[in-house]
């Protein structure tokens, strides 16, 4: 395994004024430098992975900024420039008059060996999507991927290079991408058009794309994949379920649609009638979540992973890490959990007050729970009522409290609320309450909003289920927000103001 860093650092230092360049070149942390900050009227700063350092007390002047600007390439509409045949990036901050008042001089490095951890995935010919927080090394891996595909596998590779992020500034691409060809993108808004142009004009076998971030780019990626071209790209988002909840980019992994099943099909599946399903085959067959430069989580079958997430399960994934001994792997799998039958011999004896008996019995029947309802409060060990009745405190509820009989309160007299209540009353049934129930409750809430209610609060849920509920609200054009703290954090649907 090789980890070879090529950073052309001297080329960046040479565009800086001497009084800034000298302390940098004398610093033993020179090879860890991330960027140099030059803001008008402030002392210059150097940023390293774990700290910032001042580069003297001399404030940055207009002459200092002009010194740098005169020695680099021209700024594009995205306020980015570079140094020809290097990977360094200089970004400008302008005032309201359009004058440059600040520069961020970011060090660009080609790190050979970073692709080794996912090399087999790249060589498989499948499309691979890289996810990870900014600055974690996604673009660095893309450069290595381009080189491996073009030189080692001898494929026709096109790099769609927005803002010269992948192959550096100037007309000649940086050697880090090997023999891959590079198509520059004039402005970020044109990236989707250049993606399609690359396929139509240059017959690539593989296309490398950095930062897919718009609906048009997601559509272009699907078009390219449907033509049999291998895609390797990056997108906004840290994890697969983050991406799934992004309405703009969820199409990259198949998208989500709400499906209403027939009564017979719902009974066969053991689910509610309204469920979420994957809408289409994923554009990217493999997703890699980058944890750090030498550790990743691989979802080898994105279609299966998305289906598992929508069923409330943890998808199969593979953790990989790399050290001096090479690449190590550990597969993590989760077995699907089926609804669990209640095993206790003495189920709760429930007295209903204002709760629909038929609905509660249906909810218990769905989960195979032994439900014992009593008509005499003296025989009960639980009183179940609704929030409306409980607020009025009628005599029967006061009698239960006086007799120290626990009172369970439903916010609404509906089946989803009853399912959640049963899950709390029957501990072994808690695992059976999952995504379908939460989405059924959200569907019902959406209908209530459409029927004129101003807001509807849903049951507390785990974070990934709340994201699904927010996505469903967006589908129906309904506003939503989360409130409260875990484990009682919940989603509320809110009618949009005209």
Image (cartoon, grey):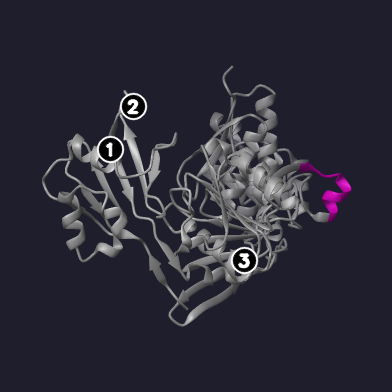
Q: Is residue 200 left or right of residue 1?
A: right
Q: Which mark is residue 98?
A: 2
Please report contact status of discs 1 and 3: CB closer than 8 Å, yes or no: no
Separation of marks 2 and 3 at Cα, in angstroms? 43 Å
Q: Is residue 49 among the parts visible in the rendering? A: no
Query: Which region of the structure is painted magenta?
Result: 259-268
> Where is residue 390 drawn, in percent x and y?
57, 34
In terms of sequence position, does the residue under pointer 2 or pointer 3 come before the other?
Answer: 2
Q: Main secondary structure of the magenta part?
A: helix
Q: Between residue 376 and residue 358, name the one nearer to us.
A: 358
Q: Can you name the residue that lies furthest to the bottom here?
A: 325
Compared with residue 67, is residue 496 higher up or lower down, i.e. above or below? Answer: above
Helix, strand or loop for disc 2: loop
Separation of marks 2 and 1 at Cα, in angstroms? 12 Å
Q: Quadrant of the C terminus?
A: top right
In terms of sequence position, does the residue under pointer 1 or pointer 3 come before the other?
Answer: 1
Please report contact status of discs 2 and 3: CB closer than 8 Å, yes or no: no
């Amino acid at each position: 395994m090789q980890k070879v860093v090529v950073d052309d650092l001297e080329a960046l230092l040479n565009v800086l004024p001497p009084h800034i360049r000298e302390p940098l070149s004398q610093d033993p942390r020179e090879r860890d430098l991330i960027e140099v900050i030059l803001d008008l009227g402030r002392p210059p700063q150097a940023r390293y992975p774990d700290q910032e350092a001042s580069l003297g007390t001399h404030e940055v002047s207009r002459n200092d900024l002009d010194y740098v600007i005169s020695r680099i390439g021209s700024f594009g509409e995205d306020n980015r420039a570079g140094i020809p045949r290097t990977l360094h990036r200089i970004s400008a901050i302008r005032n309201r008059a359009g004058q440059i008042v600040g520069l961020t001089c970011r060090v660009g490095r080609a790190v050979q060996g970073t692709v080794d951890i996912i090399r087999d995935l790249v060589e498989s010919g499948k499309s691979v999507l890289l996810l990870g927080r900014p600055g974690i090394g996604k673009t660095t891996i893309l450069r290595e991927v381009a080189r491996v595909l073009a030189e080692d596998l001898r494929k026709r590779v096109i790099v769609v290079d927005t803002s010269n992020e992948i192959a550096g500034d100037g007309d000649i691409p940086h050697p880090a991408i090997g023999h891959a060809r590079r198509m520059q993108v004039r402005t970020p808004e044109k990236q989707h058009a250049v993606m399609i142009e690359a396929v139509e004009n240059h017959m690539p076998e593989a296309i490398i794309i950095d930062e897919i971030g718009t609906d048009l780019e997601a559509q272009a990626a699907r078009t390219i994949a449907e033509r049999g071209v291998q895609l390797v790209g990056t997108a906004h988002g840290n994890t697969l379920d983050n991406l799934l909840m992004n309405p703009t980019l969820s199409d990259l992994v198949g998208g989500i649609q709400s499906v209403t099943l027939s009564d017979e099909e719902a009974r066969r599946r053991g689910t509610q009638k309204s469920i979420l399903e994957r809408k289409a085959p994923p554009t990217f067959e493999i997703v890699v979540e980058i944890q750090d430069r030498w550790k990743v989580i691989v979802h080898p079958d994105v279609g299966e992973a998305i289906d598992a997430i929508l069923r409330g399960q943890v998808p199969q994934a593979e953790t990989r890490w790399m050290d001096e001994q090479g690449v190590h792997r550990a597969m993590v799998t989760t077995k699907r959990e089926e609804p669990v039958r209640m095993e206790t011999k003495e189920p709760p004896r429930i007295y209903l007050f204002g709760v629909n008996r038929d609905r509660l019995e249906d909810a218990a029947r769905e989960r195979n729970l032994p439900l014992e309802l009593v008509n005499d409060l003296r025989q009960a060990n639980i009183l179940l009522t609704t929030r409306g009745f409980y607020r009025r405190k009628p005599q029967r509820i006061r009698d239960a409290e006086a007799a120290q009989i626990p009172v369970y309160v439903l916010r609404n007299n509906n089946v989803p609320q009853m399912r959640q209540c049963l899950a709390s009353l029957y501990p072994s049934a808690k695992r059976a309450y999952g995504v379908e129930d939460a989405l059924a409750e959200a569907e019902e809430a959406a209908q209530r909003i459409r029927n004129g209610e101003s807001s509807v609060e849903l049951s507390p849920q785990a974070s990934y289920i709340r994201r699904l509920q927010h996505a469903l609200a967006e589908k129906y054009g309904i506003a939503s927000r989360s409130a409260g703290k875990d484990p009682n954090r919940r989603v509320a649907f809110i009618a949009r103001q005209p």
